[in-house]
Amino acid sequence: MVLPGKPAEIFDRDAEWAELARFVGDERPGATLGVVSGRRRQGKTLLLYELARATGGFYFGATEATETDSLRRLGTALGRHLEAPGPLNLADWGEAVDALLALGRERPTTVVLDEFPYLARASRDLPSIIQHALTPGRPERTASRTRLLLCGSALSFMGGLLAGSAPLRGRAGLELPVAPLDFRAAAAFWGMTDPALAVRVFAIVGGTPAYRREYVQDDAPSGAEDFDDWVVRAVLNPARPLFREARYLLAEDPDLRETALYHSVLAAVAEGNATRGGIAGYIGRKATDLSHALTVLEDAGLLARDPDPLRGGRSRYLITEPLVTFYQAVMKPTWTALEQRRGADVWRRSQRRYASAVLGPRFEDLVRQWVLRFAAPETLGGPVAEAHAGTLTDPASRTSHELDLVALGEPPADGPRPLLAVGEAKWGRRLGVADLDRLVQAREVLRRRPGVDAERTRLLLASAEGGTDQLRDLAADRDDVLLVDLPRLYTGE
């Protein structure tokens, strides 16, 4: 089977399309199962619909409905696909799954069940039915080359499909997450060539494709001078869907039941209370009472735990969706004024808060992402395996250093792990020699610590404002100092 080329209307997603095309193009006998997951509005439906269309396959988009209604809709869609005289009468899901397997009797056939959680919640035994249908040696499976793809946006549910003792564990040949676009791809998607503008926009809407299209009706800032007006008319405007989107992100996942608690946890993190203890203090709960809420938000893809590589057992939490951070920091405290269409006044008063609570932390994260994904191995003296923020304690001086970047190499077979870089990342401040001196001191402390090899650690200074002339002169004469400005962040290695 000739693998289909990616349609022009699908932006980026080359790796995802290649994996899907390889999966559905497998010529070997026997039906196979794949699972595709990702938060809503990332383009999963378009990706799978176009895949089914390009391969002559079958696509079915589920809705919230009873089991009987869903089977009726599926039978109607199958009848239309097969050009039958009328709908197929599917008595139950066992019969329905066998009908889907029968589509692949002649050739590899793509079959997509989109929004699978809707079907599974109305029919709790559906995963077990699929497991039985795909039993090795079962004639309906061995005689089929159906490539069955289950897709869903409820990340906690989809993550559980193949986990632990779940019925489908061990049955899937593909497990594909569809993540938001990275900051470079997002800039290209929004048509932005000005990196400073791209960071400002990304800090609000992140890399979710739908926020560029449906949610703002293709309204993008025409330039840096249009950014403030764009925020008011596209984000802080009660008439635009983006205005309430951050609230809906929690409401639409059925596994997130204690929404008040989850909103409070997210608010705490947006306020800079990133540790478990800090979150607990902010919302007035015991730290031990937060385990479930933090786990649920992680499973839902809204929080990520970032371990501190310099303090074993310590970690901080990051909000993964920029729009949620922006909502918690800027919109939620001024919600009444925004509903009264006073967005321009709110935005004018929120500049400092946007810079400190939204833009600054997101820029630090972009620098870490650049180190992980885009920096060449020779830039940092080797491939980066992990990049985190860290807190370094100096026992001799009884001081601590907050490091925006701690980049670690691959663990060696024996000996200490290479510490490739430590760094400072600041959005609104030009970095100078004093910042470099602080990193030099931190490196000296690390060189005295066991467990890491800091002998060749690079010192990275990243700033949207750039470095002072003196710092640039020093960096030009030293191969252990690395300066990263906005152009390098978006185009360099």
Image: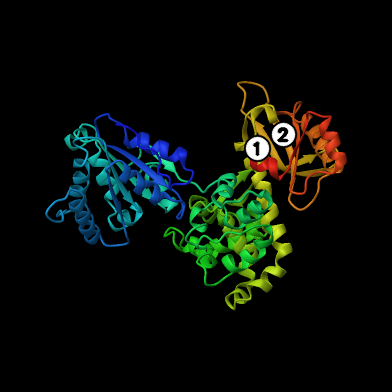
Residue extending farthest to the bottom is 340
Secondary structure beneath label 1: helix
Instruction: State the residue at coordinates (62%, 64%).
Output: 231
Horizontal side, residue 43 vs residue 334: left or right: left
Quadrant location of the N terminus?
top left
Q: Does 350 sit above or below residue 175?
A: below
Instruction: State the residue at coordinates (77%, 49%).
Output: 465
Look at the numbered discs 2 and 1 and tell me whether their residues touch, using CB distance below 8 Å.
yes
Image coords of residue 148 (percent x, y):
29, 42
Q: Which residue is mark 1?
A: 371
Q: Does 455 sit above or below residue 475?
A: above
Residue 406 sits in quarter: top right
Instruction: Indicate how the structure is coloured in the image.
Output: rainbow
Image coords of residue 261 (percent x, y):
54, 63
Residue extending farthest to the left is 85
Badge number at residue 421: 2
In the rendered structure, which disc, 2 or 1, sits on the residue that comes first in sequence?
1
Image coords of residue 349 (percent x, y):
72, 69
Q: Amino acid at mark 2?
A: Ala
Q: Nearer the viewer, residue 346 or 53?
A: 53
Secondary structure beneath label 2: strand
Image coords of residue 366 (percent x, y):
64, 46
In three-dimensional space, the C-alpha distance between marks 2 and 1, rounded to whole angstroms, equals 9 Å
Instruction: State the residue at coordinates (46%, 55%).
Output: 41
Q: Does 224 sit above or below residue 493?
A: below
Q: Nearer the viewer, residue 414 or 220?
A: 220
Residue 324 sits in quarter: bottom right
Horizontal side, residue 258 vs residue 123: left or right: right
Q: Amino acid at mark 1?
A: Val
Badge number at residue 445: none
Judge the density around disc 1: few (<14), some (14-19), many (≥20) Cα neighbours within 10 Å.
many
Q: Nearer the viewer, mark 2 or mark 1?
A: 1
